[in-house]
Image (spheres, rainbow, N blue to C red):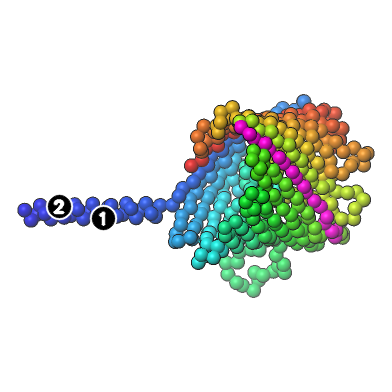
Amino acid sequence: MQSKLNIIAIIALVTAVFTVNAADIEKLMPDFSGNVMVRGVADVKDFNPDTDPAYNNVLKVRFGFEKEVYKNIFIKAEVQDSRMLGQTNNLTAEGNHVFDLFQGYVDIKDIAGTGLGIKAGRFQMMYGTRRVIGNSAWNINERKFDGAILKYHKKRFSADLFYTYYNDETPYLLKSLPNMYGQEKYYRTNVYGLWTTTDLQKAGQLHIFGVMESDSKNNNGAEINLNRATVGFNHFGKFGDLKTTVESAYQLGSQETDNGNTTVEKDIAAYMFGFQAKYKPNRFEAQIGTYMFSGQDAGAKETTLYNNGMGNKHNMLGSIDYFISIKGGTAGLGINNFYAGVGYDLIPKKLNASLIGHYHMTNQEAPNGDNTLGSEIDLELKYQPVKNLVFKGGGALFFADDLMQQIWNTDESMSYWGYLMVQVGI
């Protein structure tokens, strides 16, 4: 009888231990996340009917976790493999790693109930319309930032004070010896700024920002210095079925250029302006908008060409992406983009089709007085049967005017592209 009681006690004890451990293990488990994207692109954008289309099939696989290790203290780590299918080399000419740490940071929130927090490590930053600072999600290697953010969030106001940097030449010194400090100055590109968001309730949401970029690049022994500030605002309005976006940014500061044996410093005076209105009373949607990026004024002493280096670029000035680089895509003349479009929910909250027409002009006239680049028609179809599964397909036709033909050195006037994509997340 006693032995039976002992067996029952042992079973009860083991059961209790395993029950507790299971609960503890569940508490210790982090929140896992992942994403797989496969995209095929047919690129016929070179205005040359004699060349074959460039078929780019890309794969992006991401996996990570997030865990609250103590009250309001979180850690997050994500890795990503990015590649062009059928190839084993690095995807980008810049030498970005195919397999890399995508994000890894410590995030401390609401310190002692003050609304203050801090994030430090490698992370993505996305603010407002993402035209000033964005993650470039379309890119196979999305944009990340290394640094820290001091955050404040209370009720209807939030502010991020951030410092990040890249292109850092400082070596990792495992040990300190007399001959290991041979370089007088180490170079890096610094990005720091303040981004505030205010909920104006019925008057919408207002973002006010200031971002500073500074570096000193060693170019054949000469320092090429950049000190560029971008200041501006985003406003998001909602008036019943009508949504509006107004944004503007102005760039100032100074930048040096290398003219062979000497460097020339120029002041910066460039701007960006955008407006969009979307009306969606039911399954139907209509939109109009314009975006302007200043170009280089031939008669100006300053640098008047707007730099959109840290902003999102795909589908911001038409999906065919001729103007990802404002400088290269427009021969430094800048761009004025005007567009209008319609959309319709074929299946509410699941299947949507959209059609948008663009008219592209340069912001500054070419030497011959021309300023028309051409027109573009974009079509996209999106199907989302469940929350974490998305199918997309689309493409564009571009009809080039004389100035665009001159930039591309072609007599052809039409080009096109198309894509199919599937994205699955957990």
Q: Looking at this view, is 97 or 114 the one in front?
A: 114
- In the picture of the structure, the residue carrying the numbered disc 1 is 17
Q: Is residue 300 left or right of residue 228?
A: right
- Residue at x 50%, y 66% (from the top left corner): 112
Most frequent secondary structure within the magenta stretch = strand
Residue at the image point whose x is 92% and y is 39% from the top: 369
Residue 57 placement: quadrant: top right
Image spot of residue 292 (x, y percent): 79, 44
The x and y percentages for residue 414 are 78, 28
Left or right of 336 on screen, residue 117: left
Magenta span of residues: 265-282
Q: Is residue 269 magenta?
A: yes
Crowd around label 2: few <14 · some 14–19 · many ≥20 (10 Å): few
Q: Which residue sits furthest left?
A: 1
Magenta highlight on residue 399: no
Secondary structure, mark 2, is helix
- Residue 370 tag number: none
Q: Is residue 81 above or below residue 382?
A: below
Q: Which residue is mark 2?
A: 8
Rendered view: 306 above or below 163: above
Mark with earlier residue (2, 1) = 2
Residue 394: percent from the left, percent from the top?
A: 65, 30
Relative depth, front residue between 122 and 338: 338
Q: Amino acid at mark 1?
A: Val
Q: Position of residue 163 (x, y in %)?
A: 65, 61
